[in-house]
Amino acid sequence: MNGKQQLQLHKFWFGCGFVLLVIVAILSLMPVPGGSEGSDKVAHVILYATLSGWFSLIVYRTISLWLIFFGLVGYGLLMELLQGLTGYRSLEMADAVANTAGAALGLVCHFTQLRQWLIKIDHHFSAIW
């Protein structure tokens, strides 16, 4: 099976990705219990690597990886700016750096077997739906 195949249910997979973006926005803008500011850099890397990994699996052109990367960097900066406006969260450039690192890290998923697995799952479900 060709790794550059387009997914049959690409609208569904992108919809799932946008749900992930909404979840990250909610998590980014809700108050942090226990004031764990500053110790959350690993969580930022993981969240943005997950977002980047997800979107990198559903695109079939490698040029789209640049759009994913810069889109998520912009999204991460927007979340940081909005956090600074909340009054209970703060804008931290270290978080933006962690978001960027995660966005870059997740792009690797495009070049792994995960893409082949998603194509197989996609084709299986597209035959059913």
Image: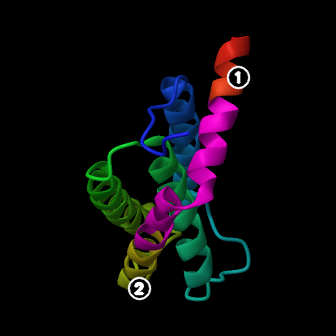
9 is higher (above) or lower (below) than 88: above
Magenta segment range?
103-122
Residues at marks 2 and 1 touching, judged by CB atoms closer than 8 Å: no
Taking the spot 38% from the left edge, 73% from the top edge, the residue there is: 100
Position of residue 31 relative to residue 51, above or below, is: below
Q: State the quadrant of the C terminus.
A: top right
Task: Name the front one of labels 2 and 1.
Answer: 1
Kindly report the secondary structure that dominates the magenta region of the rendered protein: helix
**Residue 7 coordinates in the image, percent (x, y):** 50, 30
Answer above or below: position of 81 versus 54: below
Residue 23 makes an appearance in the image: no
In this picture, residue 25 sits left or right of residue 71: right
Dot 2: element: helix
Question: Residue 9's x, y, as percent?
Answer: 55, 24
- Residue 101 visible (yes or no): yes
- Report the coloring of the rendering: rainbow
Residue displayed at 65% across by 83% down: 36
Quarter of the N terminus within the rendering: top right
Residue type, numbered disc 2: Ala
Whether residue 14 appears in magenta in the rendering, the answer is no
CA distance separating discs 2 and 1: 41 Å
Residue 8 point in image, percent of width and height: 52, 23
The residue under the point 63% across, 30% down is 122
User: Which residue is situated farthest in the top direction here?
Assistant: 129
Q: Which residue is mark 2?
A: 94
Circle number at residue 125: 1
Q: Is residue 112 left or right of residue 97?
A: right
**CA neighbours of label 2 inside 10 A, class few (<14), some (14 to 19), many (20+):** some
Whichever of callouts 2 and 1 sits on the residue coming sooner in the sequence is: 2
Residue at (51% x, 49% y) in the render: 57
Give the x, y percent position of residue 25: 51, 52
